[in-house]
Image: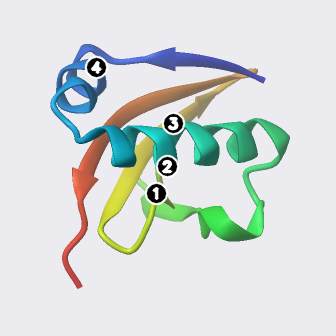
Amino acid sequence: MNLRYTELFRQNFSSLPKVIKDKYRKQEKFLLISVRYPSLRAKKYDESGDVWQARVDDHYRFYFQIESDTYVIVNILPHSD
């Protein structure tokens, strides 16, 4: 699988603290191994838009779409319980 990033993701990612960026990069590596990697807890977020949500940590989630052989990383946002 390949990765592609939206401009929205790039903008939001650039403003995150280094610790969150590092955690995201770790989770991104797991995504490339398998969308079902346990620590990702990936699930469909929006069926109509085919958007998935995955866990960065307790406080952040990232959102992506699957297009053929590419994960399109759409956004990364704080997560509220």
In the picture shown, does residue 39 fall above or below 53?
below
Marks 3 and 4 sit apart, C-alpha to C-alpha, by 15 Å
Residue 26, percent from left and from top: 62, 44
Vertical placement of 11 versus 57: above or below?
above
Looking at marks 2 and 4 on the same chain, the residue that comes earlier in the sequence is marked by: 4
Looking at the image, is mark 3 or mark 1 nearer the viewer?
Answer: 1
Of the residues shown, which amino acid type is indicated by label 1?
Val
Residue 66 is drawn in which quadrant?
A: top right
Which quadrant of the structure image shows residue 11? Answer: top left
Residue 21 is situated, as x and y percent measured from the top left of the image, at: 39, 38
Would you name the residue on which mark 4 appears? 10
Type of the residue with mark 4: Arg
Identify which amino acid the numbered label 3 is placed on.
Gln
Query: Local crowd at mark 1 within 10 Å, few (<14), some, or many (≥20)?
Result: many
The residue labelled by disc 3 is 65
Q: CA distance from mark 2 to mark 3?
A: 20 Å
Say which residue label 1 marks.
56
Q: Residues within 10 Å of mark 2 (few under 14, many from 20)?
A: some
The quarter in which the N terminus is drawn is top right
Q: Nearer the viewer, mark 2 or mark 1?
A: 2
Q: CA distance from mark 2 to mark 4?
A: 16 Å
Q: CA distance from mark 1 to mark 4?
A: 16 Å
SS state under label 1 = loop
Q: Are marks 3 and 1 in contact (CB under 8 Å)?
A: no
Mark toward the start of the polypeptide (2 vs 1): 2
